[in-house]
Amino acid sequence: MQSKRIAALVLALVMACTTAIPAFAAPASPRILSEQAWTILENCGNFLDTNGPARLRIKAAKNPVYGSPVELSITAEPEDTQFIGVVIGTKGMAEGYVGLILPEKVRILLELIPLPSSMAVNPNARGEFNLYQYIKQLIDGNDAEVLIRVAEELTGIIEILQYYAPSLTDVVEGMKTALNLIRFYLPATMATRIYLDEQPTDSGSYLVGAVTLGSSLFNNAGLASIKVARKSEGVRMYWTQQTPATMTVAEAAAFDFSAVTEDNGTIVENSIVSYTYKNKSGTPRYNSDVPPTEPGEYTQTAVLGGNYQADNISREFRIVE
């Protein structure tokens, strides 16, 4: 099935590149491309010839907090050095997030390759459909194995396009190095979600790497750790229902013991709250995260998790026959 999909994509590329732009032709007649297209392609390729020793710097917004832009950026010295960035979530709600960050010139190059609109998720959408959009729709929201397959498929496609644009060799090598970085740091058992050219948003810790195109080695300052804090300002937690002084076994079975999370007055849907129930001394032993329904005196504590942070809340209640 995979080989059929690659073959179909290659065929679509060949058809598109020989009829639509007019685009890539046989290398014996490289100037079949329009002057505008060649200007863009040459601009995308020239930077690959000057990649020497480089210094990459990875930055994010100072003290980023969930709900605010992380503003992740990667800069290089010399400034015309091109790179591929990889973002891997390692802790907290960020765990399992993987993102690829393509340089602008590579993205422009992929956008130059038209594809049939029938390959789009929504074939009836207006506007042109291209290779970049196709890769993005395959990657976004899928797991790591899909990313690795799609990225390898991308390198395979680029290797084919090298026949028409030889300078793309360094893009292939950069993508392969990025894949090695993902495989090295991503646990095989971790559930993941992959995105292309998207900023990370969830709270937690991220490992960000960047590799220069055409180099099989990480350059200095090519790795950084970024932490996005949980949001606490304007966040509060309270009980959905107030417990009466005493309740019967039947009332306890029907009672809503949950808590509500608010962010500046707006209820947070599907907030992550954990609960513990413990018996008071002198009553039957009970220590669980399941609400009790047997007679006794209990203490309930709610702890907010996920992307939000607020003070824990506790209450006592009594169940009678």
Image (spheres, helix red, strand yellow):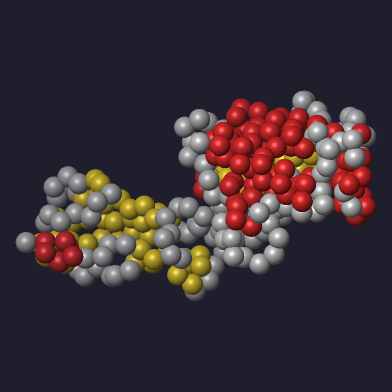
Viewer-proximal residue among 175 and 315: 175
Q: Which residue occupies 24% across, 45% down? A: 287
Q: Is residue 61 above or below residue 8?
A: below
Q: Position of residue 181 (x, y in %)?
A: 66, 31
Judge whether residue 188 can be spotted in this image: yes
Between 132 and 67, the one lying in front of the other is 132
Estimate the x, y position of residue 193 in percent, counting from the top left. Answer: 54, 45
Q: State left or right for residue 292 relative to residue 7.
A: left
Q: So how many labels did they put on this image?
A: 0
Residue found 90% across the figure and 40% down from its top: 29
Q: Residue at x 33, y 53 (%)?
A: 275
Q: Is residue 225 visible?
A: no
Task: Depth check: give the residue in front, 167 or 178.
Answer: 167
Looking at the figure, which quarter contains the C terminus?
bottom left
State left or right for residue 11 relative to residue 211. left
**Residue occupying the point 34% across, 66% down:** 239
Image coords of residue 115 (percent x, y): 68, 51
Picture quadrant of residue 270: bottom left
Q: Where does residue 161 sit, x and y in percent of width and height?
A: 77, 37
User: Going by the picture, which residue comes out furthest to the bottom?
Assistant: 265
Is residue 211 depicted above or below 100 in this figure? above
Residue furthest to the top in view is 217
Where on the picture, by quarter, is residue 74? top right
Left or right: 187, with 167 as reference point:
left
